[in-house]
Amino acid sequence: TPVNFISYFHKVIDRFELTKQENVSFIRDFPDEKIVIEIDQDKITQVLDNIISNALKYSPQGGKITFRVRKKEDHIEVSVSDEGVGIPKSDLSKIFERFYRVDKARSRKLGGTGLGLAIAKEVVIAHGGRIWAESQERKGTTIYFTLPTERVKEDE
Ligand code: ATP
Ligand code: MG
């Protein structure tokens, strides 16, 4: 179904804004223009929920989380940046594999199963998009994904 992506994304973030710790701040950097795209809203919500929970989970006290949407020629690029522990280069591509977790001890303490990003990847690819991560250890992580603005045929 066609969704006004910006207002939808605001609602998803608002839900986290209500429950997050006060010392973490949220920044939204969105285009002014209206962007209507075809998405499975429940599934993309699952993707965003996981990416945002990860950002919160690995953020330090007082950390900043930045949400961005960029309109490109035939897709939008959505990103969530944190100022957390970061991910070593050698692990960057593996975090999208099932059950893969960087630093097992730390991850176990913080909870989770290591499935979140694997599911996110499946959903984004099913929508005709891509997902990737950029990170600097001890500086922070950005998770990016794209969604086509012109809907490709769906195989569900
Ligand atoms: P689940 O999502 O199933 O509850 P999880 O959060 O551990 O568990 P994923 O969301 O798939 O699993 O993430 C995989 C791993 O990638 C995490 O265990 C963590 O090591 C690393 N990771 C993901 N996001 C971040 C982030 N923002 N900063 C640092 N490490 C991250
Ligand atoms: Mg997760």
Image: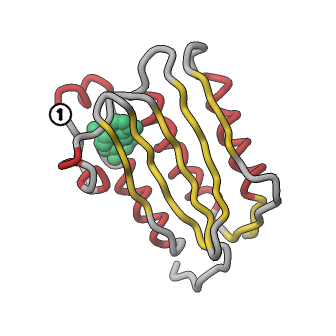
**Residue at the (60%, 23%) spot, across then down:** 25
Q: Position of residue 132 (x, y in %)?
A: 39, 57
- The answer to whether any part of residue 113 appears in the image is no
**Residue at the (77%, 66%) spot, across then down:** 36
The residue that mark 1 highlights is 104
Q: Nearer the viewer, residue 155 or 136?
A: 136
Q: Is residue 128 left or right of residue 121?
A: right
Q: Amino acid at mark 1?
A: Lys
Q: Position of residue 24 (x, y in %)?
A: 55, 20
Q: Position of residue 57 (x, y in %)?
A: 41, 28
Q: Could you say which quadrant of the image residue 14 lies in?
A: top right
Total numbered circles: 1
Ligand 2 image position (quadrant): top left
- The answer to whether any part of residue 78 appears in the image is yes
**Residue at the (50%, 70%) spot, across then down:** 129
Element type where label 1 sits in the image = helix
